[in-house]
Amino acid sequence: MSHLKAKNFSVYFLQEVHCSENATSIWAAEWGYETLFSCCTSTKGGVAILFNNNFGFQIQKVYTDTSGRFIVCDVKIEERCITLATLYAPNDDEPTFYQNFFDHLLDFRCEDLIIGGDFNLVLDLGKDKKGGQAKTHTESVKVLQIFMAEHNLLDAWRILNLDSFQYTWRRKKPEVHCRLDFFLVSQGFMCNVTQANISVGYKTDHSLITIKVALHSNQRGPGFWKLNSSFLSDINYVNQIRRAIQEVLAEYENDDDVNPALLWEMIKLKVR
């Protein structure tokens, strides 16, 4: 708890915490602020969401999985409703887990959605796995990708780090590296995500993953934005923007899953 508090984040998603019904009240007291737990009945599982006191929020609705695999909640933050969900997926290829998770997610109606946790699979074998056999939980990936398309969900870290190779879990013998942990963010909310990082974990073989979200309490008024037109006279700047646009167009030229609206969002993210 001391390690987490020192980070001074606003919301924490924790997986495989091995919590029991008897321990949650003690852990909640240790944390000192709002907590949500989904406890496990075995030696594996258990997830939690911890809220800090450094921002204003109101929890409006909660569902906790009885097997200790996921939590979903609607939270009102600065007059904005956001659905938060954390999950700890099984180690085996169990597509029914994702089907069950998204079935419960349908009961939550916030326009903005953030899902984070240990998915125990990789979305892109070429970019998200190093070493070992070139395979993942194929059936689970299929189900997850279907729901990602239906809910317009984006892999936040990959969007902000298009060509990077970083991993969140590793094994030494045999050497394997995978990015099993990530945040899925609704497409319309992705413009509010300003950072997505992978850093060293604490007493675990998984890395710490973080995203930074910009929320503004000031109401939108009749103001206007004006381009600094001097940038258009800087040929290096202009060429850099052109290259950024062409790189995105080339990368997704043959990707049928990227529609024009999503492609435009990708271009803007790359340009930014």
Image (tube, rainbow, N blue to C red):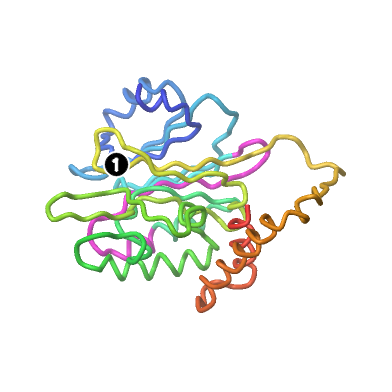
Q: Nearer the viewer, residue 59 or 191?
A: 191
Q: Is residue 67 magenta?
A: no
- Depth check: 55 or 94 in front? 55
Residue 143 image position (x, y, % from top left): 39, 68
Q: Is residue 59 above or below residue 53?
A: below
Q: Is residue 87 magenta?
A: yes
Amino acid of disc 1: Gly
* 153 relative position to 265: left or right: left
Residue drawn 45% across the image and 56% down it: 104
Tell me residue 220's x, y (percent): 79, 42
Direction right: furthest residue: 222
Which class describes the residues within 10 Å of circle 1: few (<14), some (14-19), or many (20+)? many
**Image coords of residue 204 (percent x, y):** 25, 38
In percent of width and height, residue 22 lies at 26, 29
Q: Which residue is drawn at 55% across and 71% down?
A: 258
Q: In this view, does 154 lie to the left or right of 111?
A: left
Magenta residue span:
76-100
The image quadrant that residue 133 belongs to is bottom left
State which quadrant residue 124 falls in. bottom left
Mark 1, residue position: 46
